[in-house]
Image (spheres, helix red, strand yellow):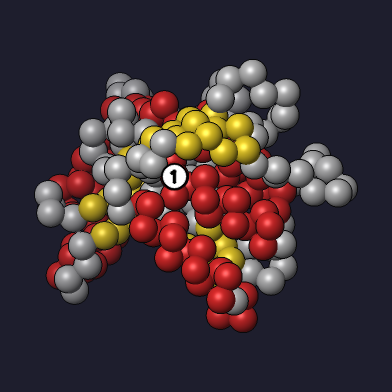
Amino acid sequence: MDAILRSVRDARAQGFEFIKHDFTTFEIFGQWGRDMGAQPGRRGWRFADATRTTAEIVLDLYRAIRSAAGTSCTILGCNTFGHLAAGIFETQRISDDTSGREWERTRRFGVNALAYRIPQHRTFFHADPDIVAVTRIIPWRLTSQWLDVVARSGTTLFIAPAPDAMTDEARNAVRAAFAIAVGTPAGHPIAGSLSPTPEEWRFTSPSVIRRYNWDVPGGADPFV
């Protein structure tokens, strides 16, 4: 823990006002959440102090990071337990990584996570559905929709633009997305969709119903 807190203090000493901390769950338990099942740690493994619960020990780490960062620093937790981080970190990643190379990752871990975890937004924390990667690998038709739904949802909007993909159309879309995001937008998928990824969404500020098409010709990839 000392090494982690030293890194946080060093970042603050250099003037950083936003810190993302990642991989602490994997580093503690040695496995990803999808592999945990009913047991977060590997079989036969436990903390040295068997008198304390997993939640108590993890909370100590989160609170120590918060204390080291100070109250004027915004913290984004990634690969952290959202229900434990609530009230400690301002922003929380709500999914696995999206991608600028594999659309299926963005559809599954971006769009779907945003759709089904958006009730937690501004309730537990400010939700981060991960980046909008603008690349030439992913068709602009798909990227532009992902950009639009994140901006209108009111959740955290991060953009990772590849310079060779930033056409005039893309630049204008990014400007429009940030113009929406700096307001007070909010939204949610409309119930009743038959698609495995919600296509119809209702937004406020500005008030609009939008329909997206997340599908690609080959369909969803079951192996991502």
Could you say where residue 46 lies in the image, as x and y percent from the top left? 45, 31
Q: Residues within 10 Å of mark 1 (few under 14, many from 20)?
A: many
Question: Which residue appears at 44% of the width and 57% of the height?
Answer: 177
Residue 194: percent from the left, percent from the top? 72, 23
Measured as percent of width and height from the top left, residue 188 is found at 48, 30
Which residue lies under the disc numbered 1?
152
Residue 118 vs 166, above or below: the answer is above
Compared to residue 185, the image places residue 39 above or below, namely: above
Q: Residue furthest right?
A: 218
Residue 165 in the image: x percent, y percent? Answer: 62, 75
Q: Residue furthest left?
A: 71
Left or right: 194 with respect to 51? right
Per the image, label 1 sits on a secondary structure element best described as helix
Q: Quadrant of residue 187?
A: top left
Q: Amino acid at mark 1?
A: Arg
Residue 168 shows in the view: yes
Q: Is residue 1 left or right of residue 167?
A: left
- The answer, for residue 81, to whether it is visible in the render is no
**Total numbered labels placed on residues in the image:** 1
| Quarter of the figure with residue 55 | top left
**Foreground residue, 87 or 66?**
87
> Which residue does the image show at 23% across and 49% down from the upper left?
65
Depth check, front residue: 98 or 200: 200
